[in-house]
Image: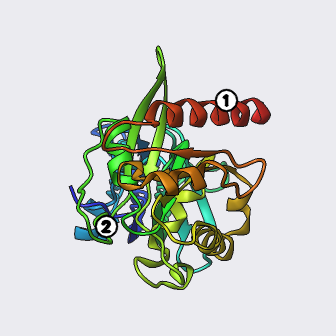
């Protein structure tokens, strides 16, 4: 299934049914009182978060959604039926934003969380509602109210514990394929990954965490270069960042600074997260390079690992260290 993480749609609540003007007319009651029923309320458009979904693809093919209008009131005090609602299902992690004001309407971060995106109009009152001691035969009723309508932007941000960040072809997809059941496309050329991949990693018995493989960053990504900013938003929700750099990189410090700079210019708060530095492709590095990397350090609070996803060397160490970082993060949030 194609990964789509943004969509713009128009939503409209159904109009309320109009109230009825009617009077009781029976064989022996030629001039009965008013008995016009109320119109039914219009249906509303709801947006519902569903953890079984992972793309907004459906909303690229259909962009307008309107709930059903309420039925009109009838005589004999019969009220109109309420219009049917429309329920739009989106992945957990979807932000809903008003297109005109750009304000966030809701951030759906939990399964089955639901909001009203466009409320239906209220049904009009029938003439029976307007009868008084001084006006026993009202000959008017209310029209139904119009439903809300607006254009909204759906923006998906993946909910993952650990985000894998690196230049194109740094080994992110290979790593996530080894530590989880995710099966991303893997090849030896840049930009193989064209969409984020999510994988569930078994850390301990009955304990798991999620990892997101973010498409490779290049210098200028925050301005739209390469795959641009279209996937940087998915890093914002992660708790731990794992910076992946090839073991054979001639200047790993410069590469790290390039990656960090792109994240900082997109959103400075991202770099406040816990970080790991992971040197990949250990299997193709010679002994001299490996000795050099063993003493390499960006900062005392950023642990360094050397792994090979191909041979499995260091993979368990990565899982253990990522899990330890997550436990610390979760404890601090309590």
Q: Is residue 59 left or right of residue 286?
A: left
Local packing at callout 1 (Cα closer than 10 Å; few below 14, some 14-19, many 20+) is few
In the rendered image, residue 148, in percent from the top left (x then y), is placed at 50, 67
Q: Is residue 332 left or right of residue 183?
A: right
Residue at figure coordinates x 39%, y 57% from the top left: 20
Q: Residue furthest top?
A: 205
Residue at figure coordinates x 34%, y 53% from the top left: 173
Q: Splitting the image into 4 quarters, where does residue 285 fall? A: bottom left
Q: Is residue 274 left or right of residue 191?
A: right
Residue 327 - label: 1
Whether residue 138 appears in this view of the structure is no
In the rendered image, residue 149, in percent from the top left (x then y), is placed at 46, 70
In the rendered image, residue 212, in percent from the top left (x then y), is placed at 45, 49
In the rendered image, residue 7, in percent from the top left (x then y), is placed at 38, 69
Q: Is residue 194 left or right of residue 144?
A: left
The quarter of the rendered structure image containing the C terminus is top right
């Amino acid at each position: 299934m194609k990964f789509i993480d943004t969509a713009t749609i128009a939503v409209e609540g159904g109009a309320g049914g109009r109230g009825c003007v009617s009077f009781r007319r029976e064989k022996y009651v030629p001039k009965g009182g008013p008995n016009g029923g109320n119109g039914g309320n219009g249906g509303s458009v709801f947006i519902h978060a569903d953890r079984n979904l992972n793309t907004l693809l459906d909303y690229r093919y259909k962009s307008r959604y309107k709930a059903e209008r309420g039925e009109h009131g009838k005589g004999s005090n019969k009220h109109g039926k309420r219009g049917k609602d429309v329920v739009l299902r989106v992945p957990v992690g979807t932000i809903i934003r008003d297109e005109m004001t750009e304000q966030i309407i809701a951030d759906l971060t939990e399964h089955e969380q639901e909001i009203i995106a466009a409320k239906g109009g209220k049904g009009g009152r029938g003439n029976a509602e307007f009868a008084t001691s001084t006006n026993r035969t009202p000959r008017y009723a209310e029209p139904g109210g119009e439903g809300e309508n607006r254009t909204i932007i759906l923006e998906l941000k993946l909910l993952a514990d650990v985000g894998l960040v690196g230049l194109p072809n740094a080994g992110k997809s290979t790593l996530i394929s080894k530590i989880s059941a995710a099966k991303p496309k893997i090849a030896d050329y840049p930009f193989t990954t064209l969409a984020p991949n999510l994988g569930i990693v078994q850390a301990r018995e009955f304990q798991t965490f999620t990892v997101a493989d973010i498409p490779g960053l290049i210098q200028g990504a925050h301005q739209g270069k390469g795959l641009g900013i279209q996937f940087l938003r998915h890093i914002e929700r992660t708790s731990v960042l794992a910076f992946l750099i090839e073991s054979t990189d001639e200047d790993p410090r410069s590469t790290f600074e390039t990656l960090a700079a792109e994240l900082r210019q997109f959103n400075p708060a991202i770099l406040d997260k816990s970080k790991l530095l992971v040197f990949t492709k250990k299997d193709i590095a010679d002994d001299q390079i490996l000795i050099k990397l063993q003493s390499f350090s960006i900062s005392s609070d950023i642990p360094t690992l050397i792994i090979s996803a191909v041979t499995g060397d260091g993979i368990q160490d990565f899982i253990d260290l990522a899990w330890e970082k997550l436990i610390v993060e979760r404890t601090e949030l309590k």
